[in-house]
Image (spheres, grey):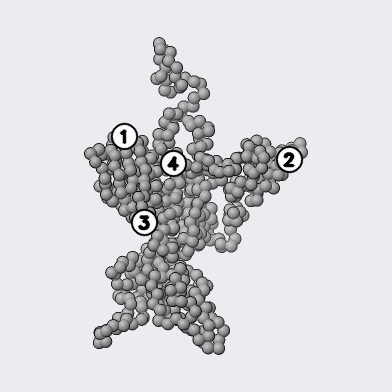
Amino acid sequence: MTNKGSNKEEKKFSIWDLPDVPMGEVPPHLQLQRTRVICNPDAPIHTDNISYSGAYASVGVDNSVQPDKFRHNFKVEVVRLNKDDIEFEMVGIDAAIANAFRRILISELPTMAIEKVLVANNTSIVQDEVLAHRLGLIPIKADPRLFEYLSANDTPNEKNTIVFKLHVRCEQGKPRLKVYSKDLTWLPNGSELIKESEKQESKPSTYTSFSCSQASQPEFSNSPICPTDDEIIIAKLGPGQEIELEAHAVKGVGKTHAKWSPVATAWYRMFPEVVLLEDIEDEMAEELKAKCPVGVFDIEDVGKDKRRAKVARSRACTLCRECIRGEGWDKRVALRRVRDHFIFTIESTGALRPEELFTEAVKILEDKCERVITELS
Amino acid sequence: MEHGSLHDPSKATFSFVDEDHTLANAVRFTLNQDPRISFCGYSIPHPSDARVNIRVQTTGDPAKEVLNDACQNLMLMCQHVRSTFDDAVAKFKENNPVEEEAGKPTEMETESDEN
């Protein structure tokens, strides 16, 4: 241990000679500040991360997160996974990085969405622009990794555009007709609308120039491109009304427009920790159990007709702070959040599986770093 | 991405175009982890410009090198996150071979769901 300050002859006082100075570990109150957000009845405190590596150098603690240390501490556990959503826990990662993943998921992962709508006929009461907007928001089941971005002076081709046709008509004398997303039919050969041109003799050209059919590509031959959900209502047609249009889907990111966001939501919450600061027994225990609307607390028998409250399901805590409301309760119960433990939930819109979304998001952050590195050298 | 430093290479501001809090905050975090850093921070000069400025001041090493190392570290962390995540997903799929319907998750999950 460091004992340089005290020299035998000079008998200089050094703080390190005191018996209760912790060396090599952060004192408990600072450790609590460092690893937990404390939720007081009025407002949470110690919300900011202490990220400076030398913050605890004076007590001999290295606050840095070097890659090998990170590798040792980092853990992931999947709680729930199905075709639409995933919930997993990430332990040992800083909010800065967890938040980067979340932000990338929402705004920087590409998907395909309808961007151009060529309306040939629309006699429905839904205006063209509203209809186009509604079509844009329909999630499309197509792997965006198989497509390229369509830039301003590109011609739409089979690598950057998906074409759908919608032609529905409600006949006279029939009841009102609902137009569903399943009525969109994929045109693997591209647009069928003929471009009007001045030169009549030239070969008729359409709005896309596909060199081959998308259906012939192995990725799509087994799973044709379609909207992810069949039952999305696009419009309602009265008798005699008709919609005929062509919709062109292109690749884009959620930053540009939310229709390209591959997630319905992606969010995380810090792991809630509920601590009983003193034994809570009998009536008090009943009161505490009744206070909590999500059933965090249970009551256990401790013998001799005594019953004591215990924290049974702290994960369920929503931080409503009901349990610390009222006189003296904040001295009995402490609500905390574990700073480096995230419960991450991703809800996919259906283009990619939720677990793929997360891996893609991490890859994007890697690409960003790589870009910086190449720019620097 | 440009590099604005004067005669002293240990202090510099880096301007990243087409980046935002996503990268800047993560890089700031990894920079702060480096003991060679004496100060670092970032700012977005104007919300309608897609640009962030990252200020790096070191105790002596060239700021560029330290930033480079920070990005390298962040990349290593990402790679580790990815492999750990893939393992966790594989493990979950192994333990739950039949994909559960969205309607009937296990007891534990319903609780967290409703909240």
Q: Report which residue position mark 4 lands on.
A: A72
Q: Amino acid at mark 2?
A: Asp
Left or right of residue A203: residue A282: right
Q: What separation in Å lies between label 1 and label 2 (alpha carbons)?
A: 60 Å
Q: Are the residues flagged by discs 4 and 3 from a single subunit? A: no
- Rendered residue at 63%/43% (across/down): A324
Give the spatial CA distance, label 2 vs label 4: 43 Å
Residue A149 appears at what percent x and percent y?
33, 65
Residue sitting at 36 percent across and 56 percent down? Answer: B48
Dot 4: few (<14), some (14–19), or many (≥20) neighbours within 10 Å?
few
User: In front: A168, or A42?
Assistant: A42
Q: Secondary structure at mark 1?
A: loop
- Disc 4 to disc 1, how far (Cα)? 28 Å
Q: Which residue is mark 3?
A: B48
Q: Amino acid at mark 1?
A: Thr
Residue A257's place in the image compared with A300, above or below, is below
Residue A159 horizontal/vertical position (percent) = 33, 69
Q: Earlier in the sequence, mark 2 or mark 4?
A: 4
